Amino acid sequence: MDDRRILQDEDHDIDRAVELIADEFREGFLRVAQITRPAVAMFGSARIGGDHPAYTAARETARLFGERGWAVVTGGGGGVMEAANRGAQEGGGLSVGFNIELPHEQHPNAYLDIEYTFAHFYARKVCFVKPSEGFVIFAGGFGTLDELFESLTLIQTGKVLHFPVVLFGSEYWGELLDWIREEPLRNGMISPDDVELLHLTDDPDDAVQMVVDCYERRCAQVPAAAVKEDAQ
């Protein structure tokens, strides 16, 4: 596990560590370069089965993106990730999975057109953001929350252009949004504009339209190539 060795400072071969990370970024960027259409990143728990409401919703949302010709980028594993990749293929879109080496062996799902397995979380995260025009986030645990708040931080700090961050499932995410308004916002830790970065929905059509509308507004303002160059 390269991440563990590097973070615990057990590996003193600095040149080799940097070389491995650089090689992984290169391989990831080569996969990203194959995504020649608008893309959305979809996140959620790997621990749910096909009978879970989040699986059904993610599959339908991704299918709708696919029908619009979009690519769907996920973590490439099971649960919500599998559902989204599956739906993307069913809709005729491009299905992308950026997996990660984990101690419990997260295997790539069976619905991937483009895939790559990373050893380092940070290289993987960059490749989630780099091609994406928006994030749609379903029920999930620590990893999903990490992806949610990292996307918000990148937008808040201007590291990427503003793109929609859609929370799918009001029952799951509603109390988190209430807490954000009642604690960080009320105490001046964030601004009202920061709260507006989040969009809550229970409808696949709404989730897709929020992302597509934002992308089309940006494309109407500047050439699409310039939009993507700035976002990356």
Image (cartoon, rainbow, N blue to C red):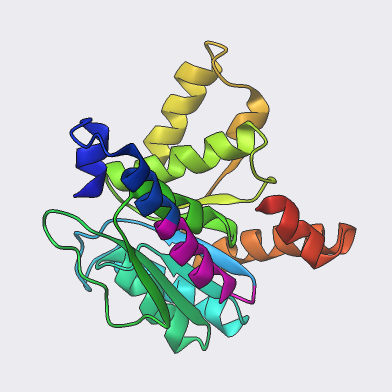
Q: Can you say whether 147 is above or below 78 in the image?
A: above
Is residue 165 located in the magenta-colored stretch of the structure?
Answer: no
Along the line of sight, the residue nearer the viewer: 191 or 225: 225
Q: Can I make out residue 171 in this image?
A: no
Asked if 140 appears above or below 153 in the picture, the reply is below
- Left or right placement of residue 47 versus residue 208 in this view: left
Tell me residue 71's x, y (percent).
Answer: 54, 74
Q: Over which residues does the magenta segment extend?
A: 23-37
Please provide percent x and percent y for residue 17. 32, 45
Residue at (70%, 46%) from the top-left corner?
Answer: 161
Q: Please report the residue visible at 52 percent of the width from the left and 89 percent of the height from the top.
A: 92
Residue 23, image quadrant:
bottom left
Considering every residue shown, the one lying at the far top of the view is 187
Q: In this orientation, does residue 198 appear?
A: yes
At 58% from the left and 56% from the top, the residue drawn is 134
Residue 99 horizontal/vertical position (percent): 32, 64
Residue nearest the viewer, comparing 66 with 160: 160
Residue 189 in the image, given as x and y percentages of width and height? 54, 15
Q: Is residue 31 magenta?
A: yes
Depth check: 199 or 228 in front? 228
Q: Quadrant of residue 119?
A: bottom left
Residue at point 28%, 82% (across, down): 110
**Vertical comparison of 140 with 83: above or below:** above
Question: For the image shown, how many numbered marks are present on the structure?
Answer: 0
| Overall secondary structure of the magenta section | helix
